Every structure is written in structure tokens, then in C-alpha cells.
Amino acid sequence: MNDVLIEMHNINKTYCTGEVEFKALHDVDLRVEQGEMLAIMGPSGSGKSTLMHIMGLLDSFDSGSYIFLDQDIKRLNSNQAAYFRNQNIGFVFQSFNLLPRLNILDNVALPLIYAGEKRSVRFEKAYHVLEQVGLADWRDHRPSEISGGQKQRVAIARALVCEPILLLADEPTGNLDSQATKEIMELFQTLNQQNMTVVIITHEKEVAKYVNRIIKIIDGRVKS
């Protein structure tokens, strides 16, 4: 049996805009085991991205408990949470978020600057993860010179370069055609087979067939 990576109980989140309150999450329970590959699915506005932001320590929650790697997340201050996130979680977003003025290798190495790694170590690690995603030969190109599917591979390499134990992907195929979607999902599967825990936020049914478990969320509540 795999070890538990994430355990959430009764997570609630409300956003306030002026006098208007919007409850994004209602008493959400979620358990993720190490080495799982799962999808969190729901329509637009269902709360799935809010859940991902809380899971990734990018946002706080109002009440409930969140244990990640035996760490009580509620007890961390903002600096501790940032350090914990950078040590353990890699993010992949729909919009790639690559810097156009940097080449592919520099884009992938960027998180290692913030981690305080030496230049030689940064580029060695960045080259290694580019090999993992099949783009080492493109290391000197800029983002404008590669396809959408390749950009997402670069974004995945950048998420992997700090050696996280959890990969969080928010609509990672939203800007891709069907062939690029297939390639990216197969890459996630390969990473998962190497014991990477992968959580994908999506509304695309095509993506769901690649995962081992689907969690459906509607109106801020986990339905199944």
C-alpha cells in the first residue's frame, strides 16, 4: 500500500468581493497517495482551480485541516509555506508561462536560481530534465521557435527541475491540439510510472482516460 501524501478534511474557502461572498469550496475531503495519477474534474467555476491552489500552497483556506507529507499546512507562516512549496511541488499551467527572451535551457533552469544553485549545477540539471521530456536538442531555441506541445514539455521540464514529489497541472492541455494532448498525457504517464505523483485539473473528458482515478467537483463540493 502506498504512503499517504495529502490528506484534506472539511476544507472550506470563501472569497469576498466588497459585500459579496462566494463560497468556492464546501467541506472538501481529499486523500492522495504517493505515486498516484489522478484528475480533478468539473465545469468552469466548480472550484477545481481553487482546490488546486490550496493543494499547491498558492492560496490559504478558511477552515479544515490539510496534512502534506505529515506537515500540518495550517501551522506554516507564508515564508515557511513558500519554502515547503518550492521543495516539494512542481506546477504546470495552461499558458506555459515561458519567458520569451530566454532560451529553452535558461527557462528550465530559472527555478534553480531561486533555489540558490550554482550556474554549472543549474544547467546540468536543466539539461537532464530536457532530456527526460525529449527536448535536449532544442535547448538553444527560444519559446517563439517551438510548437505549443513543445512549450508545454518545456514547462513540464521546468516543473521537474527542482525534483518535486508532486506535480500539479492546471488545464495542461487546454491550449493544445489532440495530437499534442496525447503526447503530453503520455509524458505524464511516464513520469507517474517513475513514481511521480501527478494531479491534473481539467474539464476535458479526453484527458481523464489517462489517469487512475477521477475526482468530480461541482459547486465547490466533491461529488465522487
Image (cartoon, rainbow, N blue to C red):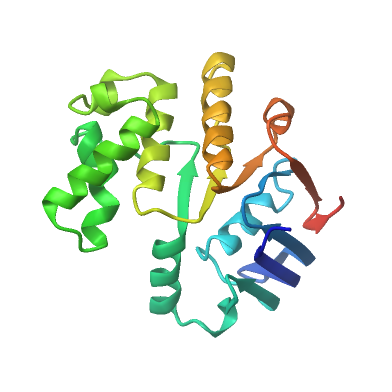
Q: Is residue 42 visible?
A: no
The image position of residue 140, as x and y in percent, is 17, 27
Check the picture and name the quadrant holding the N terminus: bottom right
In the rendered view, would you say 151 is above or below 59? above
The image position of residue 96, as x and y in percent, is 41, 36
* Residue under the point 18% across and 35% down: 101
The image position of residue 180, as x and y in percent, is 51, 19
* Residue under the point 53% across and 60% down: 56
* Residue under the point 55% across and 17% down: 177
* Residue under the point 62% across and 50% down: 35
Q: Is residue 131 left or right of residue 9?
A: left
Task: Pick out the residue farthest to the right.
Answer: 223
Task: Pick out the residue farthest to the top.
Answer: 179
Task: Pick out the residue farthest to the front.
Answer: 1
Q: Is residue 216 left or right of residue 129?
A: right
Task: Pick out the residue farthest to the bottom.
Answer: 75
Q: Is residue 92 left or right of residue 181?
A: left
Q: Who is closer to the viewer here, 133 or 76?
A: 133
